[in-house]
Amino acid sequence: MIRKKSSFLTFIFSLMPGAGEMYMGFMKRGLSLMAAFFFFIFIGAWLTMGLLLLPLPLIWFYSFFDTHNLRSTPDEEFYALEDDYILFPDINKDHVRMLQSKYRNVFAIILIVIGFSILWNNIYKVFNDYLPNIIDNILYDIGYYFPQLLIGSAIILFGFYLIRGKKKELDAAEQNIFLEDKGGSQ
């Protein structure tokens, strides 16, 4: 049940993104914020890309002020609020199934890359003491930079995909205008 809680404990829990919302009973909202916060930490640390940590202050401040705004909401409005996920608030099960079937291969590739990276690093740790120094350095570099290279390549390919999709849209719009002009001039 969603209900107002202690001001002091609300403040304490608001220091962790999502925990303040969860403390007040908004589990979905809190879970969304907490998952986003720790997702960016995980991806940034795994890929050793500090740039991916830039959204963390935004998520933290949003969560902090959202918690305190919820706490200061008048009672009638507070009890009328519904708990929902922040990123996809009104997503239904059919839409989720459609997304799962459409992007199943993308999720599979991501899981394979993560699994391969974990496996590679652990196998490397077992054998690195027995390898000559140059081979050890080469294998370390492959294991260290492989995820970054793969993610970077995927981002570039996704950019080309978006450009190609926009070009197809523009070409189709141009074709429609040409057909309308040709049909209207006859």
Image (cartoon, rainbow, N blue to C red):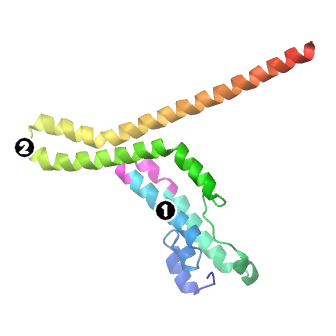
Q: Position of residue 119 (x, y in %)?
A: 25, 48
Q: Which mark is residue 130?
A: 2
Q: Which residue is mark 1?
A: 35
157 is higher (above) or lower (below) than 129: above
From the viewer's side, name the closer residue of 145 and 68. Answer: 145
Residue drawn at point x = 35 percent, y = 42 percent: 147
Q: Position of residue 157 (x, y in %)?
A: 48, 32
Rendering quarter of residue 81 = bottom right
Residue drawn at point x = 65 percent, y = 30 percent: 166
From the viewer's side, name the closer residue of 175 and 21. Answer: 175
Q: Position of residue 164 (x, y in %)?
A: 59, 27
Q: Position of residue 109 (x, y in %)?
A: 41, 42
Give the side of residue 80 with respect to residue 71, left or right: right
Q: CA distance from mark 2 to mark 1?
A: 40 Å
* Residue span colored magenta: 45-55
Q: Can you name the residue that lies furthest to the bottom here?
A: 6
116 is higher (above) or lower (below) than 18: above
Give the side of residue 72 with respect to residue 25, left or right: right
Q: Residue type at mark 2: give it.
A: Tyr
Residue drawn at point x = 52 percent, y = 67 percent: 31
From the viewer's side, name the closer residue of 177 and 156. Answer: 177
Rendering quarter of residue 174 = top right
Q: Are marks 2 and 1 in contact (CB under 8 Å)?
A: no
Looking at marks 2 and 1 on the same chain, the residue that comes earlier in the sequence is marked by 1
Magenta-highlighted stretch: main secondary structure? helix
Is 92 one of the magenta-colored residues? no
Q: Is residue 48 visible to us here?
A: no
Is 54 one of the magenta-colored residues? yes
